[in-house]
């Protein structure tokens, strides 16, 4: 059992508890309360720092680390078709394994304890999760070119019995890359398993306009009418929405996962988070992939989520930090159906320690506001996933030497670039 003591704790109501301690046994939070005697394998003096639930990256594409800063400064359609898809065609399953491990290292050093990961080569991502100990929910990535409803069903059955840090959710890439016949098959799968479905949705105006031209309705309306949304799920981006779309999202209990840095960088727009929040739609946050962001930092996403809403609504009180932190912690866990949404006895031990002894955290007028408005990856002192410490004070414990991993991923990237130029 591991004992954290002399700490502040962000409890399940997102209030700060002073001078308590937290015990972890195996992969579960065993006790939160005042000091008392017990036997421990390790005792960690937090020195007044804050323990809080880890960030949940509710939308990403981990193996795309090899495309970081490779395909920049283009609109989404050109970015995908001219730069991303040709490079991805050279990627192997072995490549995806190491590239996913690199993403996991970046995640844990930034306080992210789980990710909702959409990409082909799910086995590579699952194996990387097993090696690193990082909690991963795989999301199906079916489209006209990759996978199929039949493979999606096999993956759903396989990876939901994989290990305690890997799960799988039904999903497809998006309306504009997936034929209507495939979408109907995915809807049937959702009804067969009574399972939620996730996808990219309404990321650009062009995407929405072309969907209306093809089907006479928006992507949100289409998914609803096909029965894809009948058991809930998550839709990624949701930048361009009508009032009817927002009503459907609320009615179908869809989680909207915003990706503000990616949407800014690709000039896709600003998602109407304040409107969605006022309508009662659940909101979560994701980084998107390292090719379109290019960082995998939830601190940056949280800041942009609130700052952009203030600009969009011309209201400085829009989307306050307390709401943003709930999006980044609790609601992301809901999107992945994971029992790690807060620090509470019986919850999974996915815990991070915020180093308050940094200039950007002082003075401590309001800890939550400090985290969202001035926090950064440098404030992550420790990251625990499933009861195991994967990152502590600059050191990685992810089953691979970090320098060797950097070198391997650089070699993969150079090989793919050479193959693409030949």
Image (spheres, rainbow, N blue to C red):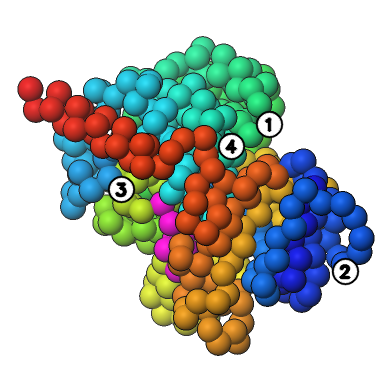
Residue drawn 51% across the image and 25% down it: 127
Which residue is the extreme one toward the right? 37
What residue is pinned by disc 4? 133
What residue is pinned by disc 3? 292
Label 2 vs 4, first from the N-terminus = 2
- Is 27 drawn above or below residue 195 in the view shown? below
| The magenta segment | 296-303
Label 3 vs 2, first from the N-terminus = 2
What residue is pinned by disc 2? 34
Residue drawn 57% across the image and 30% down it: 130
Q: CA distance from mark 1 to mark 3?
A: 30 Å
Q: Secondary structure at mark 4?
A: loop
Front disc: 1 or 3 = 1
Badge 3 crowding class, 10 Å Cα cut-off, few under 14, some 14 to 19, many 20 or more, is: many
The chief SS type of the magenta part is helix
Badge 2 crowding class, 10 Å Cα cut-off, few under 14, some 14 to 19, many 20 or more, is: few
Label 4 vs 1, first from the N-terminus = 4
Q: Position of residue 128 (x, y in %)?
A: 49, 30
Mark 1 vs 3: CB contact within 8 A: no
Front disc: 3 or 4 = 4
Label 1 vs 3, first from the N-terminus = 1
Residue 164 numbered tag: 1
Asked if residue 80 is among those painted magenta in the image, a careful observer would answer: no
Horizontal placement of 33 versus 229: left or right?
A: right
Q: Position of residue 60 (x, y in %)?
A: 44, 43
Label 3 vs 4, first from the N-terminus = 4
Locate the C terminus and report the quarter of the image it occupies.
Answer: top left
Q: Quadrant of residue 181?
A: top left
Q: CA distance from mark 3 to mark 4?
A: 26 Å
């Amino acid at each position: 059992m591991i004992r954290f003591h002399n700490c502040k704790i962000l409890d399940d109501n997102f209030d700060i508890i002073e001078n308590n301690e937290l015990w972890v046994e195996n992969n579960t939070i065993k006790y939160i309360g005042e000091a008392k005697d017990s036997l421990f394998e390790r005792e960690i003096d937090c020195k007044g720092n804050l323990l809080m639930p880890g960030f949940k990256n509710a939308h990403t594409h981990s193996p795309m680390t090899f495309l970081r800063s490779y395909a920049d400064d283009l609109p989404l359609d050109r970015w995908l078709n001219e730069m991303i898809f040709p490079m991805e065609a050279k990627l192997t399953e072995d490549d995806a394994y190491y590239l996913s491990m690199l993403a996991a290292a970046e995640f844990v050093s930034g306080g992210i304890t789980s990710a909702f990961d959409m990409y082909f080569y799910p086995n590579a991502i699952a194996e990387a999760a097993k090696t690193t100990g990082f909690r991963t929910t795989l999301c199906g990535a079916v489209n006209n070119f990759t996978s199929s409803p039949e493979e999606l069903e096999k993956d759903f059955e396989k990876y939901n019995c994989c290990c305690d840090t890997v799960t799988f959710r039904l999903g497809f890439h998006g309306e504009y890359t997936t034929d209507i016949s495939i979408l109907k098959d995915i809807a049937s799968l959702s009804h067969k398993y009574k399972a939620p479905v996730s996808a990219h949705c309404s990321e650009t105006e062009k995407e929405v306009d072309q969907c209306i031209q093809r089907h006479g309705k928006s992507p949100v309306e289409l998914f609803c009418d096909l029965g894809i949304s009948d058991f809930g799920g998550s839709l990624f981006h949701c930048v361009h929405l009508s009032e009817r779309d927002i009503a459907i999202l609320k009615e179908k209990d869809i989680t909207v996962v915003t990706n503000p840095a990616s949407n800014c960088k690709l000039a896709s727009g600003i998602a109407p988070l304040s409107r969605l929040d006022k309508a009662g739609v659940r909101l979560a946050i994701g980084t998107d992939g390292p090719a379109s962001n290019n960082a995998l930092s939830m601190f940056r996403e949280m800041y942009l989520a609130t700052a952009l809403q203030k600009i969009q609504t011309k209201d400085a009180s829009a989307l306050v930090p307390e709401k943003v932190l709930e999006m980044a912690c609790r609601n992301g866990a809901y999107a992945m159906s994971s029992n790690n949404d807060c620090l509470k006895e019986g919850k999974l031990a996915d815990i991070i320690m915020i180093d308050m002894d940094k200039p950007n955290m002082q003075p401590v007028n309001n800890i939550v506001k400090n985290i969202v408005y001035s926090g950064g990856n440098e404030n992550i002192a420790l990251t625990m996933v499933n009861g195991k410490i994967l990152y502590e004070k600059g050191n990685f414990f992810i089953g691979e030497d970090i320098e060797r991993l950097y070198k391997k991923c650089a070699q993969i990237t150079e090989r793919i670039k050479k193959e693409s130029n030949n």
